[in-house]
Image (cartoon, rainbow, N blue to C red):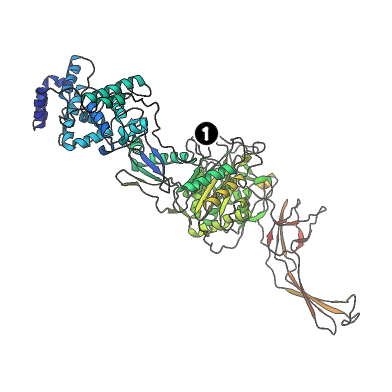
C-alpha cells in the first residue's frame, strides 16, 4: 500500500518519545481514550526479540545418484533471493509505490494508527492504507492481516523493536521474499518466474512496475484474470516512479507500451521420468508419518512443503528405467485390464531401488506395492511358503525330510463353510494330483501345496504366523490353514523385505524410500537406515538359500535363471488365477513382481489372457528381464554354503489331516528304502553252445557272477498311490572259466530306468522312465514287486505346483 505523507509535528514528537525509554507508557497515556478498544494489546514483552515466521521454502527431492527428482511445495511458491539478486529497478518500483521514505524515515506511520482508531471508535469505514514496509512485514510474519486498531498498535510496537534488531537492508530483503503477488507466488523471485519466466535479477521496468502495483491487491490486479485493471494499475505505478524522479519520460513511455503476461509458468517441477511419481508419493507418505519432522501432522506437512528440506531418496534411476521397461515389455496385451507391480530392494539396507506401482488408468494413485490409496494386500500364493520353510528349518527339520504330497488333501477346520462343512480341501497347483512321499526340497521346488499344508500344520499355524511376523509380514486371519499356501492378503513390499532378509543372511531391514533428510541449516533430521535386525540365523538362511535356488534351477521358476549368476526365489499363483507372483533375489538385490487386476480379483485365463497365468510365467519373465538389466556389470556374488544337512526322516501327516475319509488315504508310517548290502558271488556250471580252437567242445564251464543285492529298488505302496525309488545302476562282475583255459572276466552296467515292474493284479502297471523321473501309479491297495536299475538315484514324481 502506498504510504501516506507524515505529519512533521505531532507524529515526529511522538516517535521521539517512543524511541526513548518511556515508549510504551507514554503511548498508553496518549491513547488513553482508546483504552477499551486496546484491551490487552499493550502487554508486549519488549525484552524478547521479535520472532518472524520462517519463510516457507520449497523442499528438494534427490534420487540415489544425487540428481534432482522433484520440488515439494505448497501453494506458497517461493524462490528466495538476496537483495543483491533483485534488479535495482524492481527495488525502486516497490519502494516508490509502497514506502518512499523507507531508508530515511521511521519504521511506523502514525497517521495510519490514528485513522484506525477513528474507524474503530467512530464506526467509520475500513482501515485506510499507509503501513510502512516494516509494518507490512510484521503484519505478514508475526500478526494477522485483520485490520483493527489493536493490531495496528501491536505492529507499531513490534516494528520499532524489529528496526532495532535488523538493518534496513535485512528488513527489505525479507519483505521482498514475503509479499504475496498472486497465483501462488510469494516474493519477487517466485513472481518473476511465474509471470515472466525470468530471474528476479532480469526484471525490466514494465515488469517491475506490474509487480509493485500488484502488492496492494494481487487478486484484483491479476494480469491473467483482470488484464484491464492490471494494466491501469501498472501504468499508475510507472507514473508514480516518474513523479518521484526514478525514471525518465522516455523510460515511462516505453514501459507503458509493453504488454502484460498472458499465462503463468508452472511453479512445480515435474515429478521426473515415468514411474517416479508414485515413488515420490511414497516418499511424502513416509515423511508425513515421521515425528522427526514435527510433533503434529500439520508440523510435518509444513516442514515437507515449506521447510526447505533436502530429501535424499533411495531411487536408482537406472534400475527404475529397467523396471519400467521389463513391465512394459513383459506384460501380455490384455487391453489394460491386467497390470504388474514391481519393487526392488537392496538387501544390505532395505532401500527401495525401483518401484512400478501396478496401477492403471482406472486406479490413478493406487500403489499395489504398498497398498497406498487402495484396500490392502494381495494373496501371495505359494510365495508365502517361505515362512513355513524357514519355520521348519529353524525348528530343526531337515530339508531332506519326506512328507506326503498327494492331492487332493483334506483338513479338519471346524466352523468352515463349504462343500464339506468343517473341512478345508486343497489341491496341488496346475490341477495335477501331486506325488506321494517327497522331500521338503522337492516340495518347495515343485510347489506342492498338499505337502506344504501338511508341513505347516505339523509345525502349527501359530508358529508359521510368528515366523512371518518376525520378518514383518502380518496376515489378517492367522487361524486359516489356507494362509500356508498364500490365501491371506499381503503387500508386495512386505514380501520383498522378507525375501531380502534371507538374501542378507537373515538380517531384516525395514524397506525405506528415504536415505536421509537434511534441514536448511545442514542439520540431519532423518539419518540413513541402521544396521538391521538379525531375525533368522545365518546358518538357517543359508539352508533356505540352497532350497530356494532349486526353484529356479529345476522347479517352477526356471524362467528366472540368470546364466552365470546364482539366484533364488519362489513362484506364487492363487485360486482361479487371480494373482501371480515371483519373489526372488540374488545376494545384492531382492525383487518381487505381482501380476493381476488392480481393481480386484479377476481370472487371468483365456480369452482375457493368451494363456493361464501362473507365477512361473509372465511374473517370472518380468523378474528375469529386470534383474538381468539391473545387475548388468555388477559382480557375481555367491550365496553362503549351507552347513551339513541332517538325515531325512518321514514326517507323518498332522492329526487334523482327514484325507482318508474323502477318498485319499494317508500313510501313517513309511519305512526308508534298505541300504545296499554286502555283495554276493554265485557260481554255476554251464555247457557252452559252441567251441573254438581254444575251448574244448562239450567240456563244462564255470561262470561266477557278483551282484550287490538281490534288489536295487524300494517300493512303497498305499491305497491308490505308490512311490518308487531306484538306486544307482549295479555293475555286474562276471568271471567265466573253461577247463584248461585262463579265466575270462567281463563287467557290464545295467541300463538306467525301469526294466520290469510287476503288480499282483489283473491289469498290471508299468512305470515310465522320463527325464524328469520315474512315474508309477496303481489304483489298488497292493504291494508291488519290481526289478529295476538306474544310473542315478531317482524318486518318482507326478506333479508340479505353481
The percent position of residue 346, horizontal first and vertical second, equals 47, 51
Q: Which residue is mark 1?
A: 363
Residue farthest along the top direction in this orientation: 123
Q: How busy is the neighbourhood of tag 1: few (under 14 within 10 Å), some, or many (20 plus)? A: few
Considering only vertical position in the picture, is 389 above or below 18?
below
Secondary structure under badge 1? Answer: helix
Considering only vertical position in the picture, is 336 above or below 742?
above
Q: In the picture, which quadrant includes the N terminus? A: top left
474 horizontally vs 733: left or right: left
670 horizontally vs 31: left or right: right
Question: Which quadrant holds residue 78?
Answer: top left
Considering only vertical position in the picture, is 711 above or below 518?
below
Residue 654 visible in this rendered orientation of the protein: no
Residues 368 and 428: in front is 368
The percent position of residue 603, horizontal first and vertical second, equals 62, 37
Give the total number of marks visible in the rendering.
1
Residue 112 visible in this rendered orientation of the protein: yes
Residue farthest along the bottom direction in this orientation: 740
Amino acid at each position: 500500500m502506498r504510504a501516506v505523507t507524515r505529519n512533521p509535528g505531532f507524529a515526529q514528537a511522538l516517535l521521539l518519545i517512543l524511541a526513548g525509554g518511556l515508549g510504551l507508557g507514554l503511548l498508553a497515556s496518549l491513547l488513553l481514550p482508546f483504552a477499551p478498544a486496546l484491551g490487552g494489546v499493550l502487554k508486549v514483552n519488549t525484552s524478547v526479540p521479535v520472532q518472524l515466521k520462517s519463510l516457507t521454502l520449497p523442499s528438494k527431492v534427490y534420487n540415489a545418484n544425487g540428481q534432482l527428482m522433484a520440488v515439494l511445495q505448497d501453494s506458497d511458491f517461493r524462490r528466495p533471493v538476496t537483495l543483491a539478486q533483485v534488479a535495482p529497478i524492481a527495488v525502486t518500483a516497490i519502494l516508490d509505490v509502497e514506502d518512499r521514505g523507507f531508508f530515511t524515515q521511521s519504521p511506523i506511520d502514525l497517521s495510519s494508527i490514528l485513522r484506525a482508531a477513528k474507524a474503530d471508535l467512530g464506526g467509520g469505514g475500513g482501515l485506510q492504507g499507509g503501513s510502512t514496509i516494516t509494518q507490512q512485514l510484521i503484519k505478514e510474519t508475526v500478526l494477522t492481516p485483520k485490520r483493527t486498531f489493536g493490531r495496528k498498535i501491536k505492529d507499531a510496537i513490534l516494528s520499532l523493536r524489529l528496526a532495532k534488531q535488523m538493518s534496513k537492508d535485512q528488513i527489505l530483503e525479507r519483505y521482498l521474499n514475503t509479499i504475496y503477488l498472486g497465483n501462488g507466488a510469494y516474493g519477487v523471485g517466485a513472481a518473476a518466474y511465474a509471470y515472466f519466466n525470468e530471474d528476479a535479477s532480469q526484471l525490466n521496468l514494465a515488469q517491475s512496475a506490474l509487480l509493485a502495483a500488484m502488492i496492494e491487491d494481487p487478486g484484483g490486479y491479476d494480469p491473467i484474470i483482470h488484464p484491464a485493471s492490471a494494466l491501469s494499475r501498472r501504468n499508475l505505478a510507472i507514473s508514480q516512479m516518474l513523479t518521484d524522479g526514478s525514471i525518465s519520460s522516455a523510460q515511462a513511455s516505453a514501459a507503458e507500451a509493453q504488454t502484460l503476461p498472458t499465462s503463468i509458468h508452472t511453479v512445480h517441477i515435474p515429478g521426473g521420468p515415468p514411474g517416479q511419481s508414485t515413488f515420490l508419493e511414497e516418499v511424502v507418505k513416509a515423511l508425513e508419518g515421521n515425528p522427526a519432522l514435527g510433533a503434529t501432522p500439520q508440523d510435518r506437512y509444513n516442514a515437507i512443503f515449506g521447510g526447505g528440506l533436502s530429501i535424499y531418496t533411495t531411487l536408482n534411476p537406472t534400475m527404475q528405467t529397467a523396471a519400467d521397461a521389463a513391465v512394459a515389455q513383459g506384460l501380455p496385451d490384455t487391453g489394460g485390464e491386467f497390470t504388474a507391480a514391481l519393487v526392488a530392494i537392496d538387501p544390505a539396507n532395505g532401500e527401495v531401488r525401483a518401484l512400478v506401482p501396478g496401477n492403471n488408468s482406472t486406479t490413478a494413485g493406487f500403489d499395489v506395492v504398498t497398498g497406498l490409496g487402495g484396500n490392502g494386500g494381495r494373496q501371495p500364493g505359494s510365495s508365502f511358503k517361505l515362512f513355513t520353510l524357514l519355520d521348519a528349518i529353524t525348528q530343526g527339520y531337515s530339508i531332506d525330510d519326506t512328507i506326503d504330497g498327494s492331492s487332493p488333501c483334506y483338513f479338519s477346520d471346524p466352523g468352515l463353510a463349504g462343500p464339506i462343512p468343517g473341512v478345508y480341501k486343497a489341491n496341488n497347483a496346475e490341477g495335477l494330483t501331486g506325488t506321494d512321499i517327497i522331500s521338503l526340497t522337492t516340495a518347495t521346488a515343485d510347489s506342492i501345496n498338499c505337502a506344504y499344508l501338511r508341513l505347516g500344520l505339523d509345525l502349527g499355524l501359530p508358529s508359521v504366523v510368528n515366523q512371518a511376523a518376525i520378518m514383518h509380514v502380518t496376515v489378517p486371519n492367522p487361524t486359516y490353514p489356507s494362509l500356508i499356501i498364500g490365501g491371506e492378503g499381503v503387500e508386495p513390499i512386505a514380501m520383498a523385505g522378507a525375501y531380502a532378509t534371507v538374501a542378507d543372511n537373515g538380517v531384516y531391514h525395514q524397506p525405506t524410500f528415504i536415505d536421509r533428510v537434511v534441514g536448511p541449516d545442514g542439520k540431519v533430521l532423518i539419518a540413513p537406515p541402521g544396521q538391521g535386525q538379525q531375525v533368522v540365523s545365518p546358518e538357517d538362511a543359508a539352508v533356505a538359500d540352497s532350497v530356494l535356488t532349486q526353484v529356479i534351477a529345476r522347479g517352477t521358476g526356471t524362467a528366472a535363471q540368470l546364466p552365470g549368476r546364482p539366484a533364488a526365489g519362489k513362484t506364487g499363483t492363487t485360486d482361479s488365477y487371480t494373482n501371480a507372483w515371483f519373489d526372488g533375489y540374488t545376494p545384492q538385490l531382492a525383487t518381487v513382481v505381482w501380476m493381476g487386476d488392480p481393481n480386484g480379483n479377476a481370472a487371468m485365463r483365456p480369452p482375457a489372457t493368451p494363456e493361464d497365468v501362473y507365477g512361473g510365467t509372465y511374473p517370472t519373465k518380468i523378474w528375469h528381464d529386470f534383474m538381468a538389466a539391473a545387475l548388468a556389470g555388477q559382480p557375481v556374488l555367491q550365496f553362503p554354503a549351507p552347513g551339513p544337512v541332517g538325515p531325512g526322516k518321514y514326517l507323518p501327516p498332522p492329526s487334523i489331516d482327514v484325507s482318508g475319509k474323502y477318498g485319499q488315504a494317508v500313510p501313517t508310517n513309511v519305512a526308508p528304502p534298505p541300504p545296499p548290502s554286502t555283495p554276493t558271488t554265485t557260481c554255476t556250471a554251464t555247457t557252452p553252445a559252441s567251441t573254438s580252437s581254444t575251448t574244448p567242445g562239450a567240456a563244462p564251464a564255470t561262470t561266477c557272477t557278483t551282484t550287490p543285492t538281490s534288489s536295487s529298488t524300494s517300493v512303497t505302496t498305499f491305497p491308490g498311490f505308490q512311490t518308487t525309488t531306484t538306486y544307482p545302476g549295479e555293475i555286474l562282475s562276471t568271471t567265466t572259466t573253461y577247463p584248461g583255459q585262463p579265466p575270462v572276466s567281463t563287467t557290464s552296467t545295467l541300463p538306467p530306468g525301469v526294466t520290469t515292474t510287476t503288480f499282483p493284479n489283473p491289469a498290471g502297471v508299468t512305470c515310465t522312465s522320463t527325464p524328469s523321473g520315474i512315474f508309477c501309479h496303481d489304483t489298488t491297495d497292493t504291494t508291488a514287486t519290481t526289478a529295476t536299475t538306474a544310473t542315478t538315484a531317482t524318486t518318482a514324481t507326478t506333479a508340479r505346483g505353481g
